[in-house]
Image (tube, helix red, strand yellow):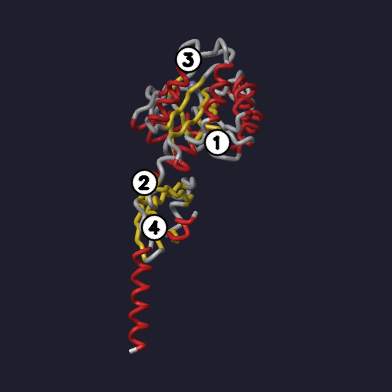
């Protein structure tokens, strides 16, 4: 009798334990790193000297890094030198491919498109040691076949952007803040496009407006993920191509990411969000490294 009652008691305890195992409200991939509301990439076109002497130091003052789109045949001429390109890359900025001669890629044949892109890849790789991970199209002009060629072995190409400058875009401090507020409110990835600074296409009458904008974006990093174009582009592609398969045994949750992308190209960690009792818990994970096991009870205590 005594033995029986012990078993009964044990069974009771066991049932209570199962009932108590936390069950997540949801398990998902965050839209942006660390479940931030929005993302911003600062990008600069054509590699003017001001980008090296003014923009990069101003970004760095705020702990930010930008993406600089370099035209192959301009390196060491009126634009940045090879040493300056290398220095930007070494300092953590992204060096992107902006074609060899700034050609309108829609107007030239497929072989010429290939050459415009490949020649610039070779030059930039010989300078920085890294093949550019992204392309921005001259005049923002591309079609389906140009995009397909540019995307070969690459994580992203710039296909939308917001121009910032004064000669042409008439950017104001208020207008840029309004844009930023909208990016955050709509949960978008805002990509800026800036050309000239003190001179050149769409130059600024007062470039300090831009420096203040860098500081403003930097001060809102609790809600905005600010990073280079390729990092956010890779995250977005992985997020969209990855499916999570989940199963739970007691307190242990197993999440198996299934990602169809080429893992030799994509290596941005994603953010997993496990919501327990209305509280979001964020974990960084590699979408290519197989099942992730999470102790939900431990997570609930965090
Ligand atoms: Zn350009």
Confirm or reject: label 2 Cβ below 8 Å from ligand 1: no
> Circle 3 is placed at which residue position?
171
| Residue 179 percent across, percent down from the top left | 43, 22
Question: Is the Cβ of the residue at disc 3 closer than 8 Å to that at disc 1?
Answer: no
Q: Which mark is residue 256?
A: 4
Q: Earlier in the sequence, mark 2 or mark 3?
A: 3
Q: Nearer the viewer, mark 1 or mark 2?
A: 2
The secondary structure type at the circle numbered 1 is: helix
Q: Residues within 10 Å of mark 2 (few under 14, many from 20)?
A: some
The secondary structure type at the circle numbered 3 is: loop
The secondary structure type at the circle numbered 4 is: strand
> Circle 1 is placed at which residue position?
122
Q: Quadrant of the N terminus?
A: bottom left
Q: Earlier in the sequence, mark 4 or mark 3?
A: 3
Q: Which mark is residue 173?
A: none
Q: Nearer the viewer, mark 2 or mark 3?
A: 3
Q: Residue 50 versus residue 13: which sits nearer the camera?
A: 13
Q: Earlier in the sequence, mark 2 or mark 4?
A: 2
Spatial separation of the CA atoms under disc 2 and disc 3: 36 Å
Spatial separation of the CA atoms under disc 2 and disc 4: 14 Å
Spatial separation of the CA atoms under disc 4 and disc 3: 46 Å
| Residue 280 percent across, percent down from the top left | 42, 47
Q: Residue 292 versus residue 222: which sits nearer the camera?
A: 222
């Amino acid at each position: 009798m005594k033995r029986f009652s012990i078993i009964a008691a044990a069974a009771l305890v066991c049932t209570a334990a199962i009932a108590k195992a936390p069950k997540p409200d949801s398990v998902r991939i965050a839209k942006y790193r660390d479940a931030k509301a929005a993302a911003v990439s600062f990008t600069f076109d054509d590699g003017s000297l001001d980008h090296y002497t003014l923009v990069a130091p101003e970004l760095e003052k705020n702990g930010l890094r930008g993406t600089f789109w370099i035209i192959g045949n301009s390196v060491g001429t009126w634009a940045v030198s090879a040493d300056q390109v290398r220095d930007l890359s070494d300092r953590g900025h992204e060096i992107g491919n902006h074609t060899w001669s700034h050609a309108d890629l829609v107007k030239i044949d497929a072989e010429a498109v290939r050459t415009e892109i490949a020649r610039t890849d070779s030059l930039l790789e010989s300078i920085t040691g890294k093949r550019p991970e992204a392309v921005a199209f001259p005049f923002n002009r591309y079609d389906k076949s140009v995009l397909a060629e540019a995307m070969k072995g690459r994580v992203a190409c710039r296909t939308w952007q917001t121009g910032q400058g004064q000669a042409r875009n008439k950017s104001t401090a208020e207008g840029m803040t309004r844009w930023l507020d909208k990016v955050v409110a709509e949960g978008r990835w805002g990509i800026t496009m800036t050309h000239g600074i003190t001179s050149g296409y769409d130059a600024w009458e007062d470039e300090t407006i831009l420096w203040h904008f860098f500081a403003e974006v930097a001060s809102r990093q609790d809600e905005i993920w600010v990073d280079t174009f390729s990092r956010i582009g890779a995250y977005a592609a992985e997020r969209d191509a990855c499916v999570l398969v989940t199963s739970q045994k007691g307190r242990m949750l197993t999440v198996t990411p299934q990602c169809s992308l080429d893992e030799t190209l994509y290596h941005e960690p994603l953010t997993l969000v496990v919501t327990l009792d209305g509280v979001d818990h964020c974990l960084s994970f590699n979408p290519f490294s197989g099942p992730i096991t999470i102790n939900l009870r431990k997570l609930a205590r965090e």
